Amino acid sequence: MIRQYGTWELALPGKTDGNPFADYEIFAEVNGEKESRVVRGFYDGDGIYKVRFMPSCTGSYSYRVYGSFSDETAEGTFMVEEADSHGMVHADGTAMRYSDGTLYNSIGTTCYVWNLQSEERQQQTYESLKKTCFNKIRFCVFPKHYDFNFHDPISFPFEGTPVDNSGITKLNFNDYKPDTEGNSWDFTRINVAHFQMMDQQIQKLMEMGIEADIILFHPYDRWGFSKMTMEQNEFYLRYVIPRFAAYRNVWWSLANEYDFCQYKTNDDWEQIAAWIQAYDPYRHMCSIHNGYIMYDFSKDWVTHCSVQRQPREVDLDYIPKWLEKYNKPVVIDEMCYEGDIEHDWGNITAKEMVHRMWTTVVYGGHPGHGECYERENVWWSHGGILHGESYKRFDLLLQMMNEANGPLIPGRDRQASTADKSYMLYYFGDRQPHCKWFTLEGAHRIDLIDTWNMTVETIGTFSGKFRIDLPAKEGMALRIVKVD
């Protein structure tokens, strides 16, 4: 029995002569009482081909599996029960909602290649995530070559062997172009074990209620994956997208820092987006992440703005302008990281991290966290164990977002409210006023929030014009809720 927004999978034996990854195809035509789709399948090794389907409705479904993988077709039926989850996330104007209409507020984190570390490190990552409120995590399919990331991953996405660059201990990416010569990859043969491992990781995150924001390409490479031809890129996407698309918690990120990918043009990115749309019948959340140059988020395939706050002209106070310009959710996936490393993007204080997270929310965006301590095992890349202080303080922020009866719309002066003004948040940030005057129609309960110490104190119920005394220190906020 399959649940609504669960994953139905069928495995069938097929042809193995030649190259099963490139020479044969498998499709499934799936028909339900309220929906019909044709989905592409994939070769899973050892003579087995698979098709996966995510039903969005309940009731009886029939299927017919066909393709050059076999001289026979397979037919059958299966039943889908009511969902035991909210479904998949989709954009709803500037907000995000699950399939059942429940509002989704994102508090994300970045762990670029946690999934390619040792099994012990992966288990540490799961245990760390359980202690947080993170409901989205960004990570890569390809391994990463950058400072603190010079060892080989536990697996690679293609069959072949990597060049030995184990002597590298330092990298200035602006001055150094990794030598990708010497790798011997067959870009037409998938390392199935790599993707079977990712299947398990995505499913585990799904069980934990965490969205898997999968980064499909990136520039930080010594193995040659960033230099693949467009034909090779299409082959890779034709395998990856059908394999993962039937998981409801998947998001697609075309690239991390797309403008640093020197072997791809904007036309290439548009073609890559078209392939993703062609191979993903469910239209998962999809975007592309910037280094210095913002992408054109008005493109139809872009569901949300995935933003790195790096240059001054891409700062958090631009979030309301992006919301108005694109009418899409704004997700600040990178706003510098808490830590103590030498790079400026990875050494802000925990208090500054909390400040930026709250600032993002009251400007109407969805914030993303990262952490850069313990250079040999940096959370930002390796996952493992969290050593910082900021992550402990996001539960309260997510609670404030979730308790609103609708998406938070930015107002003036770090103030956000629901559309009906029945719920408001004022965040004073690095300012320290000793009081605040209000004029409100009807009775409103006002709570004083200490965002660092995580305390919420009810001041009282007020109406008309009134003054609220404040403790004159940084990091304070007010929650104002209309009383019936």
Image (tube, rainbow, N blue to C red):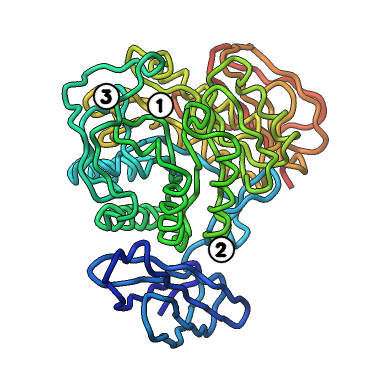
Task: Determine whether 42 is above or below 29 in the image.
Answer: above
Kind of residue at disc 1: Ser
Contact flag, marks 1 and 3 (Cβ < 8 Å): no
User: Nearest the camera: 392 or 129?
Assistant: 129
In the displayed structure image, the side of residue 459 where residue 217 appears, left or right: left
Residue 472, image x, y percentages: 58, 11
Kind of residue at disc 2: Pro
Q: Residues within 10 Å of mark 2 (few under 14, many from 20)?
A: some
Question: Residue, x 43% and y 18% (percent of image)?
Answer: 345
Residue 302, image x, y percentages: 62, 44
Disc 1 to disc 3, C-alpha distance: 22 Å
Would you identify the image quadrant in which residue 449 lies? top right
Question: Residue, x 62% and y 36% (percent of image)?
Answer: 330
Residue 133 visible from this viewpoint: no
Residue 282 visible from this viewpoint: yes
Q: Residues within 10 Å of mark 1 (few under 14, many from 20)?
A: many
Kind of residue at disc 3: Phe
Label 2: which secondary element:
loop
Would you identify the image quadrant in which residue 2 lies? bottom left
User: Nearest the camera: 379 or 271?
Assistant: 271
User: Mark 1 highlights which residue?
Assistant: 390
User: Mark 2 highlights which residue?
Assistant: 281
Residue 317, image x, y percentages: 65, 22
User: Mark 3 highlights which residue?
Assistant: 148
Disc 2 to disc 1, C-alpha distance: 38 Å
Mark closest to the chain's N terminus, 3 or 2: 3
Indicate which label's residue lies in the foreground, 1 or 3.
Answer: 3
